[in-house]
Image (cartoon, helix red, strand yellow):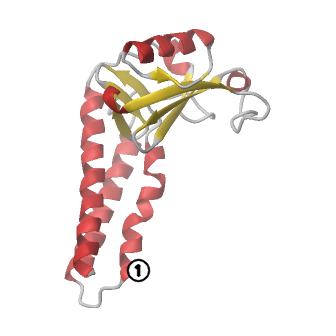
Amino acid sequence: MKVVLYIVAFGVIVFYSYRFIQVMIKMKQTPLLPTTNEERKVLRKYPQKPVTWARYSDQKWGILIYLFMLMFMYFIFIIGLFSDDFELTLYMWLFLPLIHSQSLFNVFAIRTDGIVSGSRFIPWKSMKTYYFNRIDIKHRYYGYSKEVNEGYELRITTKGYFTNCIVTSSEMKERLTEILVDHGVKCEK
């Protein structure tokens, strides 16, 4: 049982390390969207504020926190590996940072080979469907600001999970639709 738990824990740590490195590499590439301040201001990962640029200088706190989270995971794994009085509850601490790892980066950027959304890179081939959901009074994002109330939620489903982004202008909605269709992502509705 211990060996299986070690293998699973190590696999999770390697997976999140790989995802972090992948996002760091994609942040170096030039984006297709957003390229101007106006485009950036109409995209929101969270309803409270527009996305920030997908650059190291603008994401430094998210990068530092993610690195700290990975180091914490490795530290707990090593303690569990060499500890004689190992308990299963020790590994619960290993998975604690994963709860909010998606929200560390306020990024939604389209690259030539996929989308960087939060702390995740999604290649075009992994995207299955997308749809725009109008934000109305019954929507969970309604009430944050006037721009959000008049916008849309873009939801992209992939293999096993989904990502979303708030779009506050019809022009950006049309542009995103065009990009997604050009890359073979199907519209759900």
The part of the image, by quadrant, that contains residue 41 is top right
Q: Is residue 9 above or below residue 61?
A: below
Secondary element at image label 1: helix
Q: Is residue 4 above or below residue 134?
A: below
State the residue at coordinates (34%, 26%): 124
- How far across and how far down the image is residue 131, in percent? 56, 25
Instruction: Give the residue at the far bottom of this rendering.
Output: 85
Instruction: Tell me the residue that label 1 is attached to.
Output: 89
- Asked where in the image residue 116 lies, by quadrant, the reply is top left
Side of 26 relative to 82 (left or right) = right
Locate the N terminus by quadrant. bottom left
Which residue corresponds to the image point at 29% horizontal and 44% vertical from the top-left? 19
Q: Residue at x 76, y 33 (%)?
A: 143
x and y percentages locating residue 174 in the rendered image: 54, 10
Badge 1 crowding class, 10 Å Cα cut-off, few under 14, some 14 to 19, many 20 or more, is few
Q: Residue 12 occupies which quadrant of the picture?
A: bottom left
**Which of the pair 173/63 is nearer the observer?**
173
Query: Where in the figure is residue 43, as x and y percent of width and height?
Result: 54, 23
Judging depth in this view, the residue of 61 and 112 nearest the camera is 112
Q: What amino acid is found at the position of numbered circle 1 in the picture?
A: Thr
